Each structure stands twice: as C-alpha cells, then as structure tokens.
Image: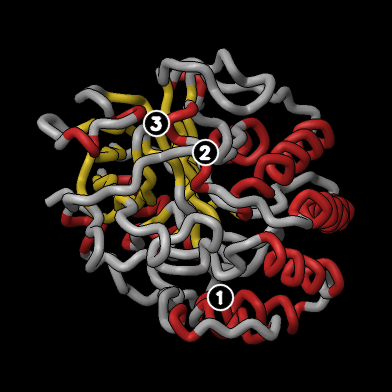
Amino acid sequence: MVPETLVRYSDSIEVRQPDEDELTEKIVASMAAVNRRAFDKYRHAVRDAHAKSHGVLKGELSVYENLAEPLRQGVFRSPRRYPVMIRLSTAPGDLRDDRISSPRGMAVKLLGVEGAKLLAGHESETTQDFLLVNMPVIPFGEVSTYWKMQQILEKHAEDPDLVKRLTGALARGANEALKLLGRPNSTLDGLSPANHHILGETFYSMAAIRYGDYVAKLCAAPLSEGVRALTGQEVDADENPSVLRDLVVDFFRMQSAEYEVRVQLCTDLEQMPVEDASIAWPESLSPYLAVGKITIPAQDAYSPVRRVYGDDRLSFNPWHCIAEHRPLGSIMRVRVKAYETSTRFRHAMNVQPVEEPRDISEMPD
C-alpha cells in the first residue's frame, strides 16, 4: 500500500555543505592517487570502487502493469520491457580475496531509455544506470565523513591488515567502520550481512534518488526460487580466492534468476533524510513496493570476452540517468566527478573507448 503522505521532489530538498566543493576535490584527488597505485600494481587499470567482478550478465527488466500513480515515474511510468546489462562485483577498488567479507554490488544498465541524460557528454545516450549494493545505507554517508575514510584508505592502501579491518568492519556492521573514524552511529549496527552467496543478496541504492515527482530509494530482491534459496547461505571458500565468480558461473550455467525491483518512497525528510545516506529509512513509515522484475536467463556469466567487456568496456555511473532519477545528497554529488575521473583514467590506460551500448547484442557471449 502506497503511503498517503509523500514528499514531493523539489530542488530545495538538497542542502549543500559549506565546504563541499573543497572536500569533493580532495576526495577525487585521493581516489585518483589510489587508482594509479592499483594500476602500477596490476599494470592494468581497474575501477576505483567495485574493481573485482564476479559475473557479467544479460537480462531484461519488465515494468509491472497497474502500478499506483506515485510508482509510475521515470523508467517505470508505463509497463514495458528494457534489455539490461548487469555487473556483479565487490566494493573495494582492489582485487581482493573473495574470502574477505565485503559489500557486494549489482550494477544495472537499462537499454532503450528515452530522454536526455544528466551526465555531460552523454545527453543523447539511450541507457540508464542503477548502482546497487547489498547494504541499505552508505556507512560514510555524507561528504565530510567520506573524506575522513578516504584519507585512511589512501594512507594505508598497501597495508593489508588495516584494509582488511576496514572492509571486515563494513561487513560485520556499518557502525564498526564508523568507530574507526571516531563517528559511531549505533542505528547502523548489524545492517550488513556476513559473507553470503552473492546471488541470494538484496541490493539497494543506499542513497536517495529522485523518483519523478517524488523521492525514493530502490532495491532488487531475490524473487525466483533458485536465488531465494541462496539467501543467507554462507560462502564455503576453502582455498578459492575467486569463489564468488565460480558460484555465479555454476548457477547460470543451467539456471535462470529473477529479482524484483522495489521502491521505498520518502514520506518524512526528518526521519528519511537525503543528505546523510548513513541513516536507514524506516520501512514502518514506508515499505518497499514492487514496480518491476529483472529476469536473467541461463548463460555463460564470465567468459573471457565477456569479462573484458564488463571490466574494461562497460562503465556505470549513478549520474548516467534521466532527470527523473537524479541522485540526491552530498555523497551522490561527490560521485559525479569521482566516477567520471575514474572512468577516463581506466579507459585511457586500457586503451578502450568510452561509449555506451545501443543494443544488448553488443555484450559478447
């Protein structure tokens, strides 16, 4: 049931921090420095976040029929089908062992999306990105806290013990990670899962986005029996540092999967803020409501040509979107320049063009 009172989108919802531009420049410069170190390590450029992929998939998003008016917004305004490209990944900007608990990601690119895109230079593209992670919040959810975290990561990028402590803290509970920065937030305790099968996870936008006339967060939750059975299943890694890739490949070799796309509409900016993405929105105020379904057929999820396409050719950016799905909040505003800087560096160093797909067939099998 759609809540009776909803927050209407307006430009006044966002409130910039006084030092936001300065902090953004520092964060982007720090991330670029870490990115260059990773290139020197691998002699190959990787993403400064979600560097390690576990599967690159083709699928389809079907928008449900007969949605209530507040749910009929943006790409969900009418029942239709979009081809999608999906990349499953792990959060750090380094190729870590899968046996280290860490947030996992699902990046979804819709094809055939009409309307001008917000990202400069991409206005005429026909794709729309949604970036999701298996945590409902961003522990470092506003720009000043993120800067503190980024300084630690840059200083200790080659320190495996500190890095493992930080990523482990993220996996055990966001509050543990914030304690490392002197900013504990007990409301975040226990929000992040342990090291579970990636295909059984629910993936969230974490931060708020514009949802047409409203404000919302998104998630993609396991729907079909095969992936629902994997929810909460501990990863048995043994000695395999790439166990998640193997689990994804083995699953999609014979099976298909369905994930339901759901929307949580904002009803109260005090209890459901957009400027601090570390605060969970209470589902008691506004539950997640279904708006569509992602179907992923059986396929080769990580062939050599598909790995190269997903890791080196494809780019995902929360700002690669139509105006109706504009990212909101300071941490999302930082991501405009951060993602673009990382993308340019990665594509230049790997000698790959920066271009958006026009057809699902462009993803090789």
Instruction: Give the residue displayed 49% in from the left and 47% down from the top.
Output: 13
Q: Which of marks 3 and 1 is in front?
A: 1
Measuring from the top left, give residue 107's x and y in whole percent.
48, 44
User: Is residue 42 visible in this depiction of the protein?
Assistant: no
| Quadrant hosting residue 349 | top right
Whether the residues at callouts 2 and 1 have beta carbons within 8 Å, the answer is no
User: Is residue 355 visible in this depiction of the protein?
Assistant: yes
Whether the residues at callouts 3 and 1 have beta carbons within 8 Å, the answer is no
Q: Nearer the viewer, mark 2 or mark 1?
A: 2
Q: In the rendered image, which residue does mark 2 sit on? A: 11
Q: Distance between the residues labelled 3 and 1?
A: 29 Å
Judge from the rendering whether residue 7 lies leftward or rightward of residue 103; answer left or right.
left
Q: Distance between the residues labelled 2 and 1?
A: 32 Å
Q: Which type of secondary structure does the marked residue at label 1 adopt?
A: helix
Picture layout, residue 152 above or below residue 322: below
Q: Residue 84 carries which label?
A: 3
Q: Which type of secondary structure does the marked residue at label 2 adopt?
A: helix
Q: Which amino acid does label 2 sit on?
A: Asp
Viewer-side residue, 240 vs 77: 77
Picture layout, residue 188 above or below residue 4: below
Q: In the rendered image, which residue does mark 1 sit on? A: 170
Q: Which amino acid does label 3 sit on?
A: Val
